[in-house]
Amino acid sequence: MLEESRLHRIRALLSSLNRVSSEQVSQHLGVSRETVRRDILKLEAMGALRRVHGGIVAPSSEPEPPLSVRNQVREKEKQAIARSAVHQLTAGQTLFIDAGSTTSLLAQELLSMSGMTVITNSLDVALRLTTPESAVSHDVIILGGQMSASAQFTCGDFTIAELLRYRADVALLSPVGIASSCGASSFAHHEAAIAAAMVRNAKTSIILADSSKIGLASRVVYATLPEIDVIISDSAAAGNPDWARLQTQCQATVLA
């Protein structure tokens, strides 16, 4: 494949996923990792992307696009993951749910259950669970803290202090990446701090990660593999070499 074609395909892949691992680029193009490395360096010099540990991200001041945009990317896969996650739960449990596009869809699926206590820092999750049209009754607790217009979730020291007052049966988390080399990670320190606190204060931790996140390691690790009980991804993850490694290192893995 000509270099010009490779560079175009890398940019197209990044525009649809926003964050891609080097392994994913190599598989997508069918070329060696050394070739991928050279192409990434060239694109970075052109300002077309930014390198992070284990992969590349879009050249934006925001580490991730708005939730309204992310909700539309790989929506079918995320819905399948959310439905599968519900099967891991039991009525009456107390849940931690962090902010993310997959956990927002999980909140929608939770409307098929009742009697849950949901503790979340996500405004979107809280609103989906308390819609006036819903006949389902959940006890929803939204954690206080700092909040910005671009990110519809709370964060900061106050949020963590409030979170640590609670104990949950299950923490359901949507990371930027999950890799056999390090575990679950996020790009932003404040998001990772919330997720880490949820993991510490929950009996069971479930990671919800579509196949584009498998093998990807972002800046801040918040849960190592021994701390993770279940990883749920979509069927396309089976083709990622790191999924096989995760299966041998994690307590349980599920393909939705």
Image: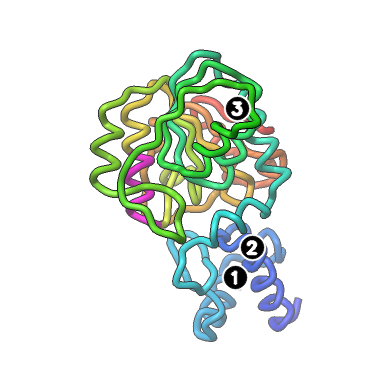
Q: Magenta span: helix, strand or loop, mainly?
A: helix
Residue range in magenta is 188-196
Mark 3: amino acid: Leu
Q: Nearer the viewer, residue 56 or 28?
A: 56
Q: Is residue 216 left or right of residue 196?
A: right
List x then y, in percent, for residue 69.
Answer: 62, 58
List x then y, in percent, for residue 177.
Answer: 50, 49
Label 1, on which residue? 36
List x then y, in percent, for residue 145.
Answer: 30, 46
Label 2, on which residue? 26
Residue 110 is tagged as 3
The quadrant of the picture occupied by the N terminus is bottom right
Mark 1: amino acid: Val
Q: Which residue is at a point 49% across and 51% down the rendered structure image? A: 176
Instruction: Compute the Cα span from label 2 to label 1.
Output: 6 Å
Instruction: Compute the Cα span from label 3 to label 2.
Output: 37 Å
